Image (cartoon, rainbow, N blue to C red):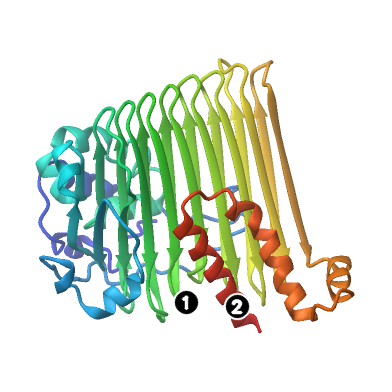
Amino acid sequence: MVTTTGTTFDAHALTSLPEAAGVIAELRARAFEEFGTFTLPSQETEEWRYTDVSNLVFDHTPFTPGGTAATLDDVPASVLEAAGAVGDRGGLQIQHNGEVMTTHLAPELVAKGVRFGDLDAAAVEHPDLVEAHLHSLVPTSRTIFTALHGAFRTGGTFLYVPPDVQVELPIQTITYLDAEGGAVFPHTLLIADRGSEVTFIDRYVSPNLSRALSDAAVELILQDGAHVRYIGLQEWGDGVQHLGVQRARLGRDATLRSLGVAFGGSLARAEVEVELVGDGSATELLGVYFGAGDQHVDHRSIQLHQGSRSSSDLLYKGAMRDASSAISTGTVIIDHDAHECDAYQTNRNILLSERAKAMSVPNLEILTDDPTRCGHAASVGPVSEDELFYLQSRGIPRDEARRLIVFGFFNEVIDRVDLPEIRESLSRSIEAELEREA
């Protein structure tokens, strides 16, 4: 079946995108051909068993202009209001629909060789870096969604940190979608050269829409000794179907601390994968999600240990209310030549209504004979009546007791987030979800 028949993502739409040059033009053409060879994934396959996308119709508007702004003062008030309070930043980029509006990077970071901005512009200004790494971790041939992404992506973020440069303040990109029936393809390509250090925040936000599509990709390349904190905040409004892939490759002694937050979208699927290639590499993968209405949240993770003495720790926690559902599938792989590794994955879910559902599917593939530690834990259940009784017996009203228990449930993750503004933002979001329930 050729999926480009009867879709708005056709050859005419491809030629109507903003002009691309060099490697981007070649990539678009190849990805579009790949898109035409795919069909939508079936629930008969293991990867999509618990998530039904058979009714997804590719009839969105492929590209919606967002305008440009010379400075933040020129950004429309509606976009700035959606961005909310932004703390001190070493760099900030705002993408509105399919276009990057504005980018700012602190002059002292520019002087140190840090490069930050529009991914398409970077392909022209830094072709060696972009050509070597773009879609190296998330190939366009991976799925129908990555092919569509490669063919129709515009905008996106490029961040390069030179060797031994330490970026003290976070750098952030905000992608704002307000095109009814539109599609957006956020892409982050982050390259942390040897011995560098940086914190990057990716935020996706929109109002409630009748229907829209977010098809996202994140590629994190950490060279030897690099240290990266990556924070992905998915706060799409109702009606947005979000499908994202985040992959990272870690060199020797590199460390990645990742936080994924999923509070929005009618369908939210995130694939998070880390290749621990170098000896001594380490990653911490944290996740928080809160489902409401008939929202479906799907997380798939892979912790692939190829380097010896590498370590990984995954902790994802979610609360589901109304008729929402969640599925978390995690796989730890210890390769044949990886020795003295340390790997763990934990997924816990709390159900706030009788109609809510959650499921965890942990997997371990230990191909070596000497992992130091490798294990998993998972749980799904309602708020404990014993805990409620204990708090009520001490004079706390039932609704307040329930709120305290939910906050305590999430605190195990929140306490491990070392950016105060992100901790506070998470607490406010959880409070808002609980107030909506009330």
Q: Which mark is residue 238?
A: 1
Q: Is residue 118 above or below residue 389?
A: above
Quadrant holding the N terminus:
bottom left
Whichever of labels 1 and 2 marks the residue nearer the N terminus, that label is 1
Residue at the spot x=13%, y=39% of the render? 111
Whole-percent x, y for residue 345 in the image: 65, 41
- Rendered location of residue 372, percent (x, y): 68, 22
**Kind of residue indicated by mark 2:** Gly
Residue 351 in sight from this viewpoint = no
Residue at coordinates 60% horizontally, 30% vertically from top-left?
333
Query: Is 81 or 60 nearer to us in this picture?
Result: 81
Mark identifier at residue 325: none
Marks 1 and 2, how far apart in space? 10 Å
The residue sitting at 64% across, 81% down in the picture is 437
Q: Residue at x 71, y 69 (%)?
A: 404
Where residue 428 appears, x then y in whole percent?
53, 70
Which quadrant would residue 82 be assigned to in this image? bottom left
Residue 193, percent from left and from top: 29, 30
What is the residue that sits farthest to the bottom in this orientation? 438
Residue nearest the observer in this picture, 29 or 293 = 293
- Residue 388 shows in this picture: yes
The answer to whether residue 133 is above or below residue 172 is above
Mark 1 residue type: Asp
Numbered disc 2: secondary structure: loop
* Along the viewing direction, whichever of 404 and 343 lies nearer the viewer: 404
Residue ranking furthest to the front: 394
- Classify 220 as above or below 35: above
Q: Is residue 144 left or right of residue 431?
A: left
The local crowd at label 2, few if under 14, some if 14 to 19, many if 20 or more residues have their Cα within 10 Å, is some
The quarter in which the C terminus is drawn is bottom right
Q: Is residue 434 toward the left or the right of residue 189 in the image?
A: right
The label number, if any, that marks residue 293 in the structure image: 2
